[in-house]
Image (cartoon, rainbow, N blue to C red):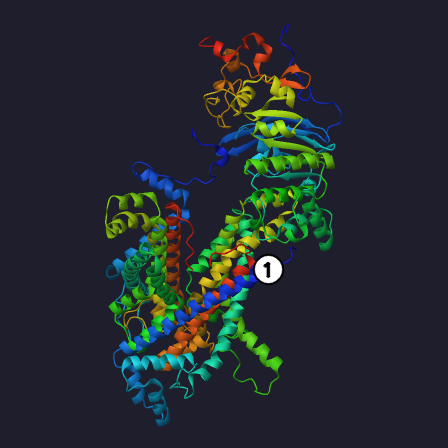
Amino acid sequence: MPNATPVSMALDGAPVPAGSVSPGRIASFLRRDPAFAAAAITLFVVAVAGILAPVLAPYDPAQLIDASARAQPPSAEHWLGTDPLNRDLLSRILYGARISLGISLVAVTLATIVGTAWGAAAGYAGGWVDALLMRIVDAGLAIPRILLLLSVVAFWGRLTIPAIVLLLGMTGWFAASRLARDSVRATREQDFVLAARATGASPARVLVRHILPHAMTPMLVAATLGVGQVIVVEAGLSFLGYGVAPPAATWGGLIRDGREVIATAWWMSVFPGLALAITVLAINVLGDRLRAAMGGTQVPAP
Amino acid sequence: MTGPPPPLAPDAGEPTSAPLLRVQDLRTYFHVRGAVARAVDGVSFDIRPGETVGMVGESGCGKSVTALSLLRLVDPPGRIEPGSSIEFEGRNLLTLDEEGIRQLRGNRIAMVFQEPMTALNPVFTIGDQVAEVARVHARASRRAAWDRAVEMLNLVGIPDPRERAKSYPHQLSGGMRQRVLIAMALVMNPSLLIADEPTTALDVTIQAQILELLAELQQRLGLAVLLITHDLGVVAEVTSRVLVMYGGQIVERAPVRELFRNPRHPYTRGLLEAMPRMGRQRERLTVIPGTVPPPTRWPSGCRFRDRCAWAWQRCADEHPPEYFVTEQHNARCHLVDEPARDVAPAALGGAR
Amino acid sequence: MARFRPSPYLGSHMARIVLKRLAQGLFIVWLTTTITFFLVHAAPGEPFAEMLTDPRMTNEMREANRARYGLDQPVFAQYLQYVRSVAGGDFGHSFTHQRPVMSVLADALPRTLLLMGTAIIIGFAAGILLGTLQGARVGGWFDRITGSVAVLFTALPDFWLALLAVMVFAGTWLPVSGFSTPTLSPTASVVTRGSDVLRHLVLPAGTLAILISAMVSRYQRAALIDVLPSPWLRTARAKGLSRRPVVFRHALRNALLPIITLAGLSMPALLGGAVFIEVTFSWQGMGSLAVQAVADRDYPVVLAAVILSSTMVVVGAALADLAHAAVNPRQRRA
């Protein structure tokens, strides 16, 4: 590198891929960052598993093979064992991937959209509007999410899947709005925004066409990480018994089933949890790399 | 001159009484990603007890790294290369273990840095930070250390020191903070004070105050000072001897008056010319063309030749040693060897 | 060790912070109360009305509730009455427990505080220590191992880790359920009972503490790395300080500031985590209570739990703010 002053050069090779993307390039990129590669592959596998569950699952997850039999440990026929109703665990986990991932993706999308709209409006408007909107967000953030979810469940009864998605989305937009607001606030002061306003563009236009694209980066990272968070939240809700109705089950529901037979059927608690943990871990690694690649400053979202 | 004089030993031209600090062939290189940045590349000098030596040069010439090397504060990937020698009060600093050098820092050799705004820890009082030196090196009790801190704050001219010691850095102005840093450096009555650009970040009037303070303290306490700066005006004020650095090396050394009166190295001349001065009829400031080359690739031969109006073929072929000019005055330039070529720049034209 | 000297602004500055936080906190709690009230009223089936017909209610309770909630009055009047009672600390009567909600909470709340308090103290202490050691030697073997483990643990759902703990420790000397041994004689000494509770506390608090320390260590590591290039750290080294005081006294003090902020911000998550831990370990604190109340449709308890938890969050955030101002002498933009 002709112009670099080595004294100040970064020691790690932060790849800045310019130009075309070739297989060789991708391969060397993956080799340099094995954690990222592992995470990407894992997520790919999980996604495929979920999408192709009907094809991949060896058994029908709801089918009771033999109503009288008890839970069986992992064996050649049932790789991950069965539950007390003798339903194949592997199949249930595969179908669970579908539901867990599906719910989370939609919920996070919803939360991001609502949160961005709210936060951007607050950030752009400033003044008392900003203060008011953000106070409401503060209140929303102050209630532990699970309690909020439980309250709704208490008063509305068992929820359908769309309702669960809606609920998860509507309890998750607070954090997104805070991010959006901070981001918009910071971007608002920049010169190119001033230039846009000077050309007479309406506030809405300035916001949507100029500020938002620039400010979306942290939102993207947060959304990615958010998927992992929502998977866990949804699992928690199912674990407490308020998730999707049986016989369908998300991973959380499977763990709940496992809790009842924890002494005799360890595989029922362990495998769904492993699936959860691995998926969330992969998402976290991905989100982390995404943040680093976009040169983001640390956004401490607990 | 008849025939080329032999290149001289680096410390020739220096005063011969036992030096407090003797640096010989100091080389500090940074090893990064296959390249080597030779930030300090063969620097030698002495400092006598009680004298004030100035080290001048642009950013990137290696003066700050030299200072850090003296206290072995250079962090990896930087490294003091074998073959270098730093002797202080007779001891070889480079063979000391970590504990040994730590005992010298802040104690026998003290350093003041160039960013008073950020060189103090924001969460501790200035009193605590100054007292800390006494607690570490003299194992003073809290009370004794605090008293000493107040004493030092008084010494550097901070008003109402007993009260002020309880304040936090952000409550002080830049000039005051610099005084605090100086106080911190002098707690243990060191023999050598290294001041790295102590006035760069300050206003001109404050600058003058700090320099005055340094001169006064130096006289009172008899300490030796190595003053690092890019500002020749500062050098003229307080130092007795000057080392001019360029390209990781010393390119000229002389007593201060001699340097100003008779600069022999083109770089020194450039620096002097570039100083804005009142009362001169000039339309433009003279600048030295070009920029400092990267320390990974010093040019062959003389490192200054790409920016030098006098340079000729020999400058590219042969790296100049330090030539003798007069007593205590050396210059690393072939012009000293071939003074015929040393004509006014305007006369050079295209003749190379 | 440098004397801990609170900032000179502490007097008026702290007062200002306290007042501001108080005002904000009240607003938030009020907002929470309002949200929950309208949540209930928007729900299908009029749960409040249902309360009147709930067979578990005695006649006295029914009358008391009718009066308290003004159930035959327009919604807005009901709301005002509701707010008034909540402000007075009156959350009504629990259906299942047949007692005032406050008394039920009074039993459960200390247990939750014990669990959370212990977990937070241990978790933060461990996390700060680990993160600091990691940051002091970035890239070293300790850093990489601890970092990987921490990343792993932050991906684990708390209830699953708790479940694993139950699986592993069931039947051992460490109890996996409850907060005290039911067969313990009520006349046993305080020491015996205390140590019994402590024994029950180990697993739940330990699980929560591990998860907390994983998260905290990551933030602490980042905070320390942020602080390490600071110029004043070089000054400290030039003074002749050895590595330990440089890192643990100078650097850490500054690197703690974002951690204190983190502590304040993560209260809701901590409370949520406590819920799952309590349920899995059958620790009869507020979390278990709330979950049970949801199953029982014991609305007064559910509402009280929500409002109380948001109050705890607000108080926690305020405390973190005060701690931050106490450690950081610079004038903070409030």
Residue at image point 68% right, 52% down: B162
Which quarter of the figure is the N terminus of chain B placed in?
A: top right
Could you tell me which secondary element the residue under label 1 belongs to?
loop
Residue C234: x and y in percent read 59, 43
Residue C130: x and y in percent read 54, 56
In this view, the residue farthest toward the top is B2
Residue C39, by quadrant, is bottom left
Residue A239, by quadrant, is bottom left
Residue B239: x and y in percent read 65, 28
In this view, the residue farthest toward the front is B279
Host chain of mark 1: C
Question: Crowding at label 1, few (<14), some or many (≥20) Cα neighbours within 10 Å?
Answer: some
Residue at image point 40% right, 60% down: A277
In this view, the residue farthest toward the right is B17
Q: Nearer the viewer, residue C136 or A52?
A: C136
> Please, is residue B6 above or below residue C140 in the view?
above
Q: Nearer the viewer, residue B301 or B15?
A: B15
Residue A202: x and y in percent read 23, 50
For mark 1, what is the residue? Answer: C6
Q: Is residue B26 visible?
A: no
Q: Nearer the viewer, residue C62 or B73?
A: C62
Task: Report the side of A95 relative to B151 (left or right).
Answer: left
Residue type at the position of mark 1: Pro
Residue at image point 48% right, 19% down: B306
Figure label count = 1
> Please, is residue C195 above or below residue A90 in the view?
below
Task: Report the side of B76 relative to A114 (left or right).
Answer: right
Q: Nearer the viewer, residue A185 or B235?
A: B235
Q: Is residue A45 visible?
A: yes
